[in-house]
Image (spheres, grey):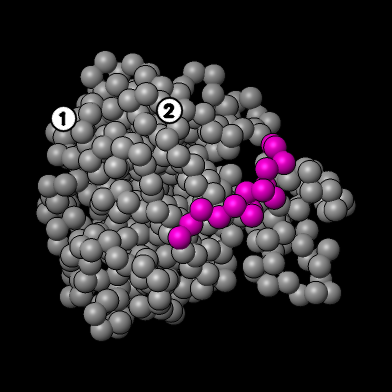
Amino acid sequence: MDNTEENAIELHGDEEIIEVIDLNDTEPGPDDLADDLGDVDFEDPGNPEDDNEGWETEDEMEAEAEQDDSELTFSKHTGSVFCVSLDPATNSLAVTGGEDDKAYVWRVSDGEVVMECTGHKDSVTCAMFSHDSSLVASGDMSGLIKVWKVETKEEIWSFEVGDLEWLEWHPCAPVLLAGTNDGNVWMWKIPAGDCKTFESPACQATSGKVLPDGKRAMVGYEDGTIRVWDLKHGNAIHVIKGQDGHQGALTCLACNKDGSLMLTGSVDGCAKLVNTTTGKVVGVFSVEGGKAKGSKDEEESNSVESVGFCNILPLIAVAYLDGTLAIYDLSTQVLRHRCQHEAGIVHLQWEESSSVVSTCSLDGALRLWDARSGNLLSEYHGHTAEILDFTINGEASLAVTASGDNQAKVFCLQRPDR
């Protein structure tokens, strides 16, 4: 997963230490710890009574904790919820993976558990449905990957790799890809298990994306290089490195609808636009003067956390750790809008068929922005900790979020123009 997730884990470590000192006698449950998040003073752990100095810059946490805009809360997880996906066929099922070493498949209409994916040895950081929604893959940090058949609720395949960085289904076949800490990219036919590996220099394969043609995959690495792999023949078609590559680890990848262009984001503070046919970098985007919020180190660049293409207009969105959502014009490469957040952005997603882009951030809120005007359309609260992942259904009528407060939530997205 990305840096944010690791930060979230560290943050929870601090939180638990503080809480244990204060509340050891009462043996709080996970919900109590989540509820008390707003009361923790991270500057001075010796003064837990003063809830005016929460982990946010303003004293909003208490009001926000009481405000819950969600339709439904899924609270089966007993640790942070790291990832969430919807089934592509009907958008009626969600799968979430968590710190409790489990994934759950559940109905978004009523929160009913359809299947519990157990047997993992570490936090489940990747969980997603196959292209036809018949299978679910769950992967934990240690590299144990399992595939489950939704209809029969049975585990049909498992495999162990090195420490897992990412997991992705092929867009039109029962084929699963994974990237690991040792730099390998694996590809399996499911459930037969026929396997192919794409080897590269020993540095993490930090992010990966199968292009829409299903024949190529783009993989980003810790050393800033990007490789376009031919999935059938197993060779690298393009290697983008040196000045063309990034000057730091890749954090995210996205491609446009026809797969002709790819956006890459990195801890170096840049997003790059790559022509997937030629392997040439055709654009570089960065927000000048940005520095990660709370960063003590002047040298520390403002990491790009998420990128994406608008499907209906020539616009792209780049989300930064300092809380900036930048909207760029794809044709002129000019910065159109800066949409400022109070806290770092974790993830962005464009709606399928509009110019609305949504973000989730470390302040626990989900926001919808109009990319044409740069205006904030709506804001949804309910989580008492950072949102670590979210997804929006095809109709853009609901969002499902995963949070460090051990909960997943379903929000109905209401907009005047619908």
How far apart marks 2 and 1 lie (CA) works out to 36 Å
Picture coordinates of residue 92, whole percent (x, y): 29, 65
Residue receiving disc 2: 375
Q: Main SS type for the magenta part? A: loop
Which residue shows up at 84% across the image and 74% down it? 25
Report whether residue 279 is seen.
no
69 inside magenta stretch:
yes
User: From which residue to which does the magenta span run?
Assistant: 57-71
Mark 2 residue element = strand
Q: Residues within 10 Å of mark 2 (few under 14, many from 20)?
A: some
**Residue closest to the eye, 268 or 225:** 268
Question: In the image, which disc is placed on residue 278?
Answer: 1
Q: Amino acid at mark 1?
A: Thr
Which residue shows up at 18% across the image and 65% down it? 132
**Residue closest to the eye, 208 or 398:** 398
Q: Amino acid at mark 2?
A: Asn
